[in-house]
Amino acid sequence: MELLSLADLLEVQNLDLQIDRLLEKRQSLPELNVYKTVHSRLQELEAKRDTSGTSLKQLDLELDKSEGEFQILETKLNEHETRLFAGGMSARETEYMRLEVQGLRGQREAMEERVLQMLEDIDPARDEVKSLETEIEAANSEKMELEASIKRQWKQIDAELARKEDRKKEAVRPIDDDLMELYEKLRRIKEGVAVASYDHNVCGGCHMAFSPAEQEEAFSSDLPRCVHCRRILVA
Ligand SMILES: [Zn+2]
């Protein structure tokens, strides 16, 4: 009965190690690291795009406002000029109007320069937002591809894990609870390996050799344990 249990326990140990490896593989897919990098790059790009987008909007508003002011100035100038052309004003009024027109022309010129400068500034700002958006799009599709690849691999690993878990359930059944409890405890403190094979006087867990007396002592027990590392031994 005890020997049967130990053989089953070794099977449980093998399955547990396979499960450990699968879990490790699940969490260390190279795509996961790349995903993290792409994700943070995407966040940086989006933050930059938002900042650039805000200043572009600001420039657009200022341009709109200046173009509106330019239009008003132009209309006023035209009206004054029309009145000057029409004549019929006193000399003083005419002189006043002439000076007004002169002033308005100066203002219009300055305004024209400002609008041109704004148009010059707005183009690079617009290009920057556009190129950031292109980068974001590329990073997004890279992220989606990675997601798909991770999901595909996880699905495979999870199916494999489910198969191992099922086999483990079968293997655990004939083992008595006390032995399982000891096994689980040893696994926690012995880097996942609770059961070791005993071969050529050496423990497969800690790789230490036994003297004939130690071997005699260990294997006289119903539950042979390594004299060095206390793992359960299966000859
Ligand atoms: Zn050992």
Image (spheres, grey):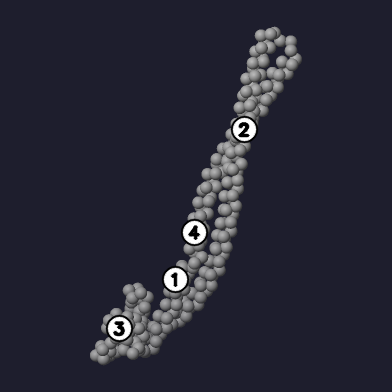
Q: Are marks 2 and 1 in contact (CB under 8 Å)?
A: no
Q: Secondary structure at mark 3?
A: loop
Q: Dividing the image into 4 quarters, which one contains the C terminus?
A: bottom left
- Residue occupied by mark 1: 24
Residue 73 image-quadrant placement:
top right
Cα distance between the residues tagged 2 and 1: 62 Å
Could you tell whether 139 is left or right of 177 in the image? right
User: On the image, which quarter does residue 218 sit in?
Assistant: bottom left
Residue 103 as seen in the image, left or right of residue 32: right
Q: Amino acid at mark 4?
A: Thr
- Amino acid at the residue labelled 2: Val
Q: Secondary structure at mark 4?
A: helix
Percent coordinates x, y for residue 96 in the rendering: 65, 13
Query: On residue 115, which mark appears?
Result: 2
Give the structural element (helix, strand or loop) at label 1: helix
Give the CA separation, mark 4 to mark 3: 44 Å
**Residue matched to label 4:** 37
Question: How far is the residue under mark 3 from the one under mark 1?
Answer: 27 Å
